[in-house]
Image (tube, helix red, strand yellow):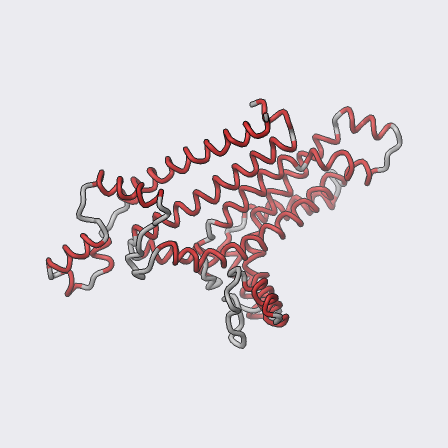
């Protein structure tokens, strides 16, 4: 009962935050300079008042702000994000087209970041203050510090252009056609078709952009894992287990690592939320047709409905992931449920 009450509270908080974010996004989009009419109509159309009036009426731009806000919230409740001014297609359809590409890239990146970050963190904690520790810490600091767009250009230049080890931009090579959409994830959909070469090609296209996106989160996970593992290793129960003659590997894997990784869960969740929001520069450089590239194109054309849709999607990603992480905290550590 206590666990269900805890989960119910978190879900209520999630609903309240969604309402607040929807309101805030609406306000911010109205403060953005520029007129979507000017951005999306030709000069000839702008000279015709009837066309301009019809355009404003079609997209609700001629109504008072309070009326626009009421319509906006009503549409949110109906999961209707409106129509893109730029493409004249439903926003949900556009997001449904580009979101799977971002999900596939984000899952690959967070897997690489978590795997390497936890491994490096453990190595760094075990070999504290050694040369290996210094190397791992230097790698983590570099991952956090290096600009993603610069790292992306370096990866393309060396591994695609110079060494030709990995393929270039896009999700598939030109010799392959897109698989039939089942999940929207090319690797999985290609495997469902039974086309292993296509699946491997799709996977190879994930390596360069996925590595670039994983670098920052990997650095954070490494530092967090190292710090928390060192803290846990200094606790009384670990010293007692060590005094009983328990080996280092068993001491870390069976006793210390579980508690040390609880805070790491937050870093992984935030990293996944960040990646699912779409990394605009990286997706643009690698010509990855995801949420980031869609957001970039929408901003350039002052496509207010699309901007609102992307902003709500990014906020939803963060809030849902944070809520899930919060609930997992309560499941793993009962003390959290008392707060």
In the displayed structure image, the side of residue 183 where residue 200 appears, left or right = right
Quadrant assignment, res 188: bottom right
> Looking at the image, which residue sits at the far front?
1
> Looking at the image, which residue sits at the far bottom?
175
- Toward the viewer: 131 or 328? 328
In the displayed structure image, the side of residue 268 where residue 72 appears, left or right = left
Picture mark count: 0
- Residue visible at 73% across and 46% down in the picture: 132
> Looking at the image, which residue sits at the far top?
338
- Residue visible at 55% across and 55% down in the picture: 212
Q: Quadrant of the N terminus?
A: top right
Q: Quadrant of the C terminus?
A: top right
Image coordinates of residue 68 in percent, x first then y, are 24, 43
- Toward the viewer: 146 or 195? 195
- Residue visible at 69% across and 33% down in the picture: 259
In the displayed structure image, the side of residue 104 where residue 227 appears, left or right = right
Image coordinates of residue 149 in percent, x first then y, are 48, 56
- Toward the viewer: 16 or 220? 16
Image coordinates of residue 167 in percent, x first then y, are 56, 69
Q: Up-down: is 281 above or below 164?
A: above
- Residue visible at 55% across and 28% down in the picture: 6
In the displayed structure image, the side of residue 230 where residue 11 appears, left or right = left
Any part of residue 239 in sight: yes
Any part of residue 163 in sight: no
Image coordinates of residue 65 in percent, x first then y, are 21, 40
């Amino acid at each position: 009962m206590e666990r269900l009450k805890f989960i119910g509270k978190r879900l209520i908080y999630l609903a309240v935050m969604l309402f607040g974010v929807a309101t805030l996004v609406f306000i911010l989009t109205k403060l953005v300079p520029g007129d979507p009419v000017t951005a999306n109509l030709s000069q000839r159309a702008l000279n015709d008042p009837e066309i301009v009036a019809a355009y404003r009426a079609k997209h609700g731009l001629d109504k008072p702000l309070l009326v626009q806000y009421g319509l906006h919230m009503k549409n949110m409740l109906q999961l209707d994000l409106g129509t893109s001014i730029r493409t004249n297609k439903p926003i949900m359809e556009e997001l449904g087209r580009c979101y799977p590409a971002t999900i596939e890239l984000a899952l690959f990146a967070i897997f690489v970041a978590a795997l390497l970050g936890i491994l490096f963190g453990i190595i760094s904690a075990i070999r504290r203050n050694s040369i290996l520790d210094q190397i791992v810490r230097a790698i983590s600091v570099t991952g956090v510090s290096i600009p993603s767009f610069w790292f992306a250009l370096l990866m393309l230049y060396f591994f695609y252009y110079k060494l030709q080890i990995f393929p270039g931009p896009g999700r598939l090579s030109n010799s392959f056609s897109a698989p039939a959409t089942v999940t929207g994830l090319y690797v999985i959909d290609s495997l469902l078709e039974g086309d292993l070469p296509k699946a491997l090609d799709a996977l190879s296209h994930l390596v360069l952009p996925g590595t670039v996106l994983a670098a920052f989160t990997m650095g954070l996970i490494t530092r967090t894992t190292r710090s928390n593992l060192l803290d846990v290793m200094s606790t009384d129960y670990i010293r007692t287990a060590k005094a009983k003659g328990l080996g280092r590997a068993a001491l870390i894997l069976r006793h210390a690592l579980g508690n040390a990784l609880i805070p790491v869960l937050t870093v992984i969740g935030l990293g996944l939320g960040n990646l699912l929001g779409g990394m605009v520069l990286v997706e643009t450089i690698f010509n990855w047709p995801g949420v980031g590239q869609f957001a970039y194109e929408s901003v350039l054309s002052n496509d207010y409905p699309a901007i609102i849709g992307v902003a709500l999607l990014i906020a939803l990603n963060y809030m849902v992931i944070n809520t899930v992480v919060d609930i997992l905290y309560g499941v793993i550590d009962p003390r959290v449920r008392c707060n």
